[in-house]
Image (spheres, rainbow, N blue to C red):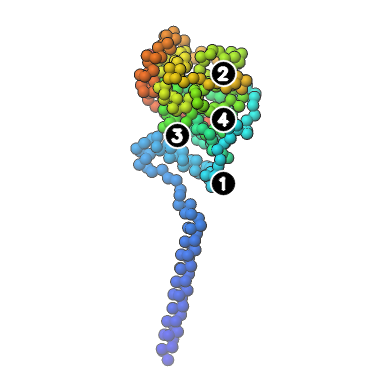
Amino acid sequence: MEAEPRRHKGGLQEKIFYILALSAFFSIICYTIFLFHGNGSFMRLPFVPQGALERNRTTSRKIMEHVWTTHTSDVSHKTTSRHLDVCPDTPPTLVGPLLVEFETKRTLESVRNHVGFSLHQGGRYKPPNCIAKQKVAIIIPFRNRYEHLNHWLYYVHPILMHQQLDYGVYIINQEGDGVFNRAKLMNIGFVEALREYDYECFAFADVDLVPIDDRNLYRCSEHPRHLSVAIDKFNYVLSSVTAFGGVSLLSEEQFLKVNGFSNTFWGWGGEDDDLYNRIIFRGMSISRPDAKIAKYKMIKHKRDLHNEVNPKNAIKAKETAINIDTDGLNSLNYTVKEILKDKMYTFITVDVQAPPV
């Protein structure tokens, strides 16, 4: 009489075990299928190794930029980016002549609200629907020109977006009230921008010049390129056949070939003439766009304090052949005091070891 209940109990346990085993096996199969079809994408979360942050500030900035881009990019762009075509030679979004005025009081916050939604941290942008033809760093030498900077950001960011550039804006701010050195700030911007990204083209631009036609492309060419051909201050006529100031573009190769700007032009004047001479001395020539589209409007202002005309600079500009191999990128010295990442720009404050006033 006791044998039957024991057999019945054992059979029930076997059935329960069999059901559980089948359930576990089915779960494993489903999980495997999920991993296979999902390609394991949920496991690819970007991370920042703590060791890298401690060892190398530049590397950590690049990692953080990658993390930010990964988390804020559109999902559809993430899945189709590998299939994008190169952007066309003539961007289809160009509008031509633009209305530019500087009477409106613009704050950085208002400008940020106006154009910042399309930008990544550090003043970075990439066209969403194609691969940019060039990676361009915009280098702006700077000190105490915040009102001018707001106008520049308001107008130029949209222009660069229309031109479908992969670009970043770098404001190189000279610390203190010592004698200003525009050329040295340009060299610093070149070096610091390359620490962050593999830029191919470098636009050296004054903050008081705003283009009034977006067909004037911020792209490097076979020769160093002078963009600010026609400025309203000079009645939209080229000021000199050797002019190379205002807004100038050089590729990385071209800038290295001339050893960058001279670092020894303190105060106003001469550094652009010296750069022009360096280009000619190295066997290159200047290219310019048509003056009909290479038009700029200048923000009127008084000369900056401690940036007075330096009569020694005109003499020095005639000594390019003597100084080109020893004065430039290969003799650059400076100290980075602070790097600020904003939606509108990367703001780098530097000590240029200015001589006492």
Label 3 and label 1: CA atoms lie apart by 24 Å
* SS under mark 2: loop
Q: Looking at the picture, how far across and down is residue 111, in whole percent?
A: 58, 29
Choose the circle earlier in sequence order: 2 or 1.
1
Residue 246 location, x and y as percent? 52, 19
Indicate the secondary structure of the residue bearing disc 1: helix
Residue at numbered disc 3 = 197
Return the disc, 4 or 3, that comes first in the chain's sequence.
4
Disc 2 residue crowd, few under 14, some 14–19, many 20+, Cα 10 Å: many
Amino acid at circle 1:
Ser
Q: CA distance from mark 4 to mark 2?
A: 18 Å
Label whose residue precedes the other's in the sequence (3 or 2): 3
Q: Secondary structure at mark 3?
A: loop
Residue at the spot of label 2:
229
Residue drawn at x 62%, y 30% as measured from the top left: 94
Name the kind of residue labelled 3 in the image. Answer: Tyr
At which x and y percent is residue 181?
Answer: 43, 17
**Percent from the top left, x then y, of residue 168?**
50, 31
Q: CA distance from mark 4 to mark 3?
A: 18 Å
The disc at residue 76 is 1
Q: Is residue 354 visible?
A: no
